[in-house]
Amino acid sequence: MADGLTGEPVNAAQRFGDMVERFGDMAQRFADLAERLRSGARVLPTQLALETVCGCNARCVMCPSQGMRRPKGMLTLATHHLMADRVAESGAAIEIISHAGMGEPLRDKTLPEKVAYEKLRFPAASVMVFTNGSLLDAEMGRRLLDSGVDVVSVSINAFRPETYTATMGLSRERTYANVEAFRDLLASTSGPRPRLNVSLVRTELCGEDEVGEFVRHWTPLADAVVLPPTIAWGSGPALGGGVPRFPCLYLWKVLMVDFDGTVKPCCEDYESSVPFGNILQQDPVDVFNCETARRMRLAQLAGDFSRPGICSGCVETLEPAREWWESASPLLEPNVGEAAAPERSGRPAAAGK
């Protein structure tokens, strides 16, 4: 029997012993999943993460977009509809659709039309838009409300004006006014309305006192105040062997699509250096189960997070992954020759970026 990434022979008993040491009670579950993958089972994505815009109007200190080398661009309405159609017809069981990527989604003036089409093609899915809020003016706010979007999450990242400007490179006055006006619009709406979340990623510029000010300001105004973990964007130091790590949920749930149709493992691969394929040219589920993806899943199920390099120091394999595996399961098609129904995936994973 060979290991999932390199193909090198591995003693099965030794491998399972290593898994028990790494994963504890989950070891048998991961061993069973690995055998299903080796027997031909395929993983079905349950989250579609679409980059409608590659290129941002902000200059966030914690984001690598300003130095990104891959081409920038915007997903056209026609290409978006083609992508949505291909995913809807592929058999993927999409429960959540998120708009983020390496750009500001509200730069796309057709975003509300895209959301409305997604609600048509995936009526049971929750659609989320992640924005810095600087372009969330009255017109865009009303159009988003009318689109049927389920969650608007605003990345604000500071409370004090000087910290905000240094962190985001945007006007704090404009962003705060936009978000508070959007909150007032939602409060005045009698029918269904989206949830409004605000978030702050801790940086060296924002001390804990300011984090507290941010939380106190937004708690009565927003549906949720989120303090997501700081990520290393694939350049962090490798995590030590004594740190308990779990298979990355993005590999099992999220079909991560660039504006040009390229699929990659996750948003930390911001240069799309580990492409799985392209959903404009290939079946989306086939892309999600390409050989590169299959080997990455098998390696992580065996406790190997060394390759590709973006995985070696990724914090998403710590608490976020552990919490997901404790509450949910990936959705697999039956093994070859099986007639059993696929497992359900549980609650949708949060789209944190």
Image (cartoon, rainbow, N blue to C red):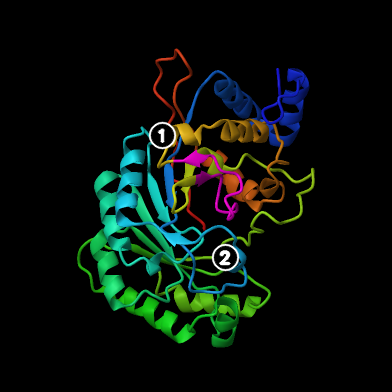
- In depth, the one of 218 and 115 nearer the eye is 115
Give the image location of residue 247, x and y in percent.
62, 39
Q: Which residues are magenta?
A: 263-278
Main secondary structure along the magenta-highlighted residues? loop
Which mark sits nearer the N-terminus, 2 or 1? 2
Q: Secondary structure at mark 2?
A: helix
- In depth, the one of 4 and 332 nearer the eye is 4
> At x 58% / y 87%, what residue is drawn?
162
> At x 53% / y 32%, what residue is drawn?
290
Query: Does the residue at mark 2 contact the one at mark 1 (Cβ under 8 Å)?
Result: no
> At x 51% / y 32%, what residue is drawn?
289
- Neighbor class of circle 1 (other Cα within 10 Å; few <14, some 14-19, many 20+) is some
Identify the residue under disc 1.
283
Give amino acid for label 1: Asp
Residue 53 makes an appearance in the image: no
Give amino acid for label 2: Ser
- In depth, the one of 186 and 164 nearer the eye is 164
Residue 268 inside the magenta-drawn segment: yes
Q: Is residue 203 left or right of residue 39?
A: right
> At x 73% / y 41%, what residue is drawn?
306
Give the image location of residue 77, x and y in percent.
30, 56
Give the image location of residue 174, x and y in percent.
42, 84
Residue 193 inside the magenta-drawn segment: no
Q: Which mark is residue 65?
A: 2
Residue 154 lies in quadrant: bottom left
Q: CA distance from mark 2 to mark 1?
A: 29 Å
Residue 47 lies in quadrant: top left
